[in-house]
Image: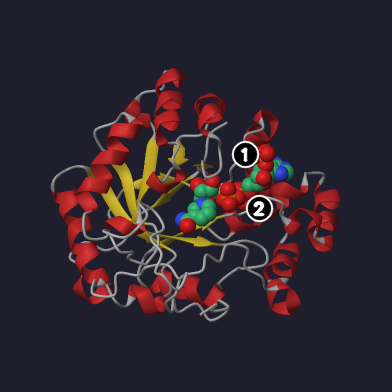
Amino acid sequence: MSSPKIKLNNGMEIPAIGYGTWQAPEDQVATVVEHALKAGYRHIDCAWSYDNEVGVGQGIKASGILREEIFITSKLWCTYHRKVEENLDDSLKRLGTDYLDLYLIHWPCPLNPNGNHYKFPMRSNGVRDIDEEWVLKDTWKQMEEMVKKGKVKAIGVSNFSKMKLDEILPYAEIKPVVDQLELHLYNPQHKLLEYLKSHDIVPQAYSPLGSTGSPLLTDETAIQLATKYEVPVSAVLLGYLLRRNIVILPKSVTPSRIEENLRLSQDFASRVSDEDFKILDSIAVNGKQKRFIMPPWPLQLGFEDWIQKF
Ligand SMILES: NC(=O)c1ccc[n+]([C@@H]2O[C@H](COP(=O)([O-])OP(=O)(O)OC[C@H]3O[C@@H](n4cnc5c(N)ncnc54)[C@H](OP(=O)(O)O)[C@@H]3O)[C@@H](O)[C@H]2O)c1
C-alpha cells in the first residue's frame, strides 16, 4: 500500500500520508519507523526537539529502502532561530543523511539561544525566555540559505497563522511550501486554509487523530460514520483530512494501527459521500471547536481561537 502525493509550489511531490514520530520513545522508534516504511510509508515527519532522530535514522537504514525514495522532514527548534545551519547539521547527523526533503520552522517563537536551558529557557518570573530582538524574516533568510547550499530541498513553516506568515512572505525569495498545523475534526481552520491556498502553500495536519488520549476517537458523529462505512473511527478522522487535500501525519507505535492508518484513511476518503463529508466538516463550527496542543508561548501567535495564557 502506498500513499497518494500532493504537488508542492516548487514542483516537488510530497506523500499525502506521512508517519509522525513525536513521542515515539527513543528505544522503540527505530523498530516502528522500520515497520512503517516496510508497510508502505515513504514520508517521515521528524523534529530535532523530539530527541529521537538517531533512532529514526536507524529505522530508515534498517528498512533497506533507498534514501531517495523517502521524504524526510525535520524542524528547526526555537532556540536556534539565529543559528539555523547549526541545528540543521545536528538533525542531519542524527538522522544519518546528508540532506532533508523538507525543513520547517517548528514554531514562530524564537527563544533565547543563550538562556538557562537548551530547549526551554525560562525567565526568573517562570515565563519562557523569548528572544525579543529577533525577527522571523531573518530566520527565513537563513532557511533559504540551506536550500541554496543543497542541504534541504524545500522549506516551510509550522504553527504559522496568517499574522506570522505575513511577517515573512513579503521578504521571501523562496516561498514556504507547507504550513504544518494542528488540524483535525475539532480544529479544521477553514479560514487559514483558504489563505494558504491563495499562496499555494500546502497544509499539513499534525495531531490528525487529536493526539495522545484523543477525545476525537469517541466523537458520536465519527463513530456513527465509522459504523456506516465499516471502518475504524481513526479512518474517519484521517480520511476526512485527506479528502480536504491535507497532508496527514498520524503517529502510532502499534504495528496494526500503523498499517490501518495508511490503508483505511484512503479507503474512507475515497468512499465518503459529499453529504457525510459536509457533516464532518461542520462539526467544529457547530460547537466542538477545540485545540489540544497549546504550549505556553508568552507572545501573540495570531490564531483566533488560541487562548492566550499570558
Ligand atoms: N509541528 C508541530 O508543532 C507538531 C505538534 C504535534 C505533532 N506534530 C507531528 O504530528 C504527528 C502526529 O501528531 P500526534 O503525535 O500529536 O498525534 P496523533 O497522530 O493525532 O495521535 C497519536 C495518538 O493516537 C494513537 N493512535 C494512532 N493510530 C491510532 C488508531 N488507528 N486507532 C486508535 N488510536 C491511534 C496513538 O497511540 P499509539 O502510538 O499507542 O498507537 C497516539 O496515542 C507527531 O508525531 C509529529 O510528527 C507536529
In the picture, measured across the screen, residue 239 lies left or right of residue 102, that is right
Q: Quadrant of residue 65?
A: top left
Crowding around mark 1 (Cα neighbors within 10 Å: few <14, some 14 to 19, many 20+) is many
Depicted 263 relative to depicted 169: above or below = above
Q: Residue at x 31, y 61 (%)?
A: 176
Residue under the image location 41 percent in, 46 percent down: 47
In the foreground, 19 or 264: 19
The answer to whether mark 2 is within 8 Å of ligand 1 is yes
Query: Which residue is the site of mark 1?
Result: 252
Which residue is labeled 2 in the image?
Answer: 209
* Callouts 2 and 1 close, C-beta under 8 Å: no
Rendered position, 309 above or below 152: below
Q: Could you say where residue 159 lies in the image, as x and y percent from the top left?
A: 44, 65
Note whether 27 is above or below 159 in the view shown: above
Q: Is mark 1 within 8 Å of ligand 1?
A: yes
Left or right of 134 on screen, residue 281 = right
- Tell me the quarter of the image containing the N terminus: top right
In percent of width and height, residue 95 lies at: 35, 32
Q: Secondary structure at mark 1?
A: loop
Report the side of 301 relative to 95 (left or right): right
Q: Amino acid at mark 1?
A: Ser
